[in-house]
Image: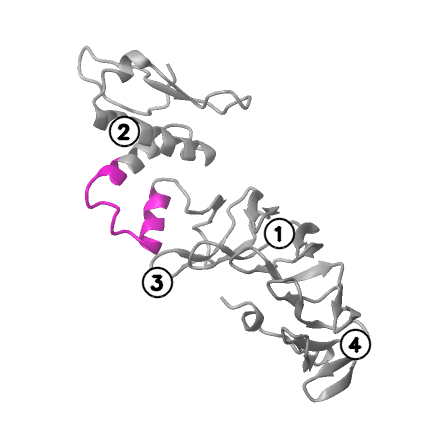
Amino acid sequence: MVNDFGQVTFPPGCGPEQIAVQQTPQFPESKTFTVDKTLWDLLDNDSKAGLILHEVIYQEGIRLGHKDSVDARYFNENLTAKGKLENLFGADYTEFLTRASFLPRVGNLYIRTDDNNLTYYPKGRIRTGTCAGPETEVVLGGNRFRVESEGTLLFYDNGAIYSALTRNGTQFLENGIYLALWASNNDEPIFYENGDVCRGIVTPSTFSVQGQQVTFMRSYDTYFYHNGAVQAGFLSSNYRLQTAQGPRDFSELDFVAFDEDGTATFLGHGETGFSPSPTTYCPW
């Protein structure tokens, strides 16, 4: 008998029976849940469904460090009670989760509820938040990488990651080229909804532009199109590039944007404090 049910009062002559036990599988073929078939066969269909739901909820609680099933039972009671949760969205639903000692989650990323980063879209989906940790592995656009604990997270309204603090040096396969992304907590990589890299401090930082190899500043963000072509960035040296008005000489630290056909446009210079708006190139 696993005593994980907390304080429960039983009628005279009655006591608890263990119908289900769950444990973390040690091997790939190991089972998570073990059910006593004799007791299972005594349940009606509603009770069987309730047991399965309870175990799934409790499994989530165990991941979050729950020591007993009290909060899982509270969550289950509210989930199955008519009119309790179906009208809770956004901050109201998060408040319920907090009361039940659970955390909101987008995909497999847990979101902190105790800071001011947590915001919502009008229909209640999480828009921004802080990764509650630990460091979490996610798959994005076919690339597998780890999101840093306590990093800021931004999401599209469908739940896809817009921006996340990745482990420095994480490699992304982009249009046949491996890019290593580098970031700080104020300068996270940005992704398109399909997972392609839109913005990042990258290595290598040399790309083919207008038929020549152009190197962009390693310590500044570079922006990309879906196909991996450079959309904009700070030049690391002097280059002659084709503009709509004809050839033009550009200088180191010039911020240059490129049309999809490669035509260059000067927009500013790094030493003047010019700072591009990320949403200009990576709509959110």
Q: Earlier in the sequence, mark 1 or mark 4?
A: 1
Q: Which residue is mark 2?
A: 49
Which comes before the other along the chain, label 4 or label 2? 2
Spatial CA span between label 3 and label 4: 43 Å
| Residue closest to the eye, 79 or 6 | 79
Disc count in the image?
4
Three-letter residue code for mark 3: Pro
Label 3, residues with CA under 10 Å away: few <14, some 14-19, many ≥20: few
Dot 4: few (<14), some (14–19), or many (≥20) neighbours within 10 Å? some
Image: 155 above or below 102: below
Residue type at numbered disc 4:
Glu
Q: Amino acid at mark 1?
A: Thr
Alpha carbons under labels 2 and 1: distance apart = 39 Å
Which numbered dot is residue 252?
4
Q: Is residue 265 magenta?
A: no
Quadrant of image for the N terminus: top left
Segment colored magenta = 77-99
Q: Earlier in the sequence, mark 3 or mark 4?
A: 3
Dot 4: what SS?
Answer: loop
Element at label 2: helix
Q: Which is more toward the observer, 67 or 275? A: 275
- 46 shown above or below 130: above
- Tell me which label, 1 or 3, sits earlier in the chain: 3
Query: x and y percent of residue 109 in the render?
Result: 49, 46
Q: Is residue 58 left or right of residue 40?
A: right
* CB within 8 Å, label 3 to label 2: no
Specify the label residue 166 is tagged with. Answer: 1
Q: Which residue is mark 3?
A: 122
Q: Position of residue 19 (x, y in %)?
A: 32, 17
Report crowding for label 1: few under 14, some 14 to 19, many 20 or more residues within 10 A (C-alpha).
Answer: many
Label 2: how many residues lie within 10 Å, few (<14), some (14-19) or many (20+)?
few
Q: Identify which residue is drawn at 61% across, 66% down.
A: 225
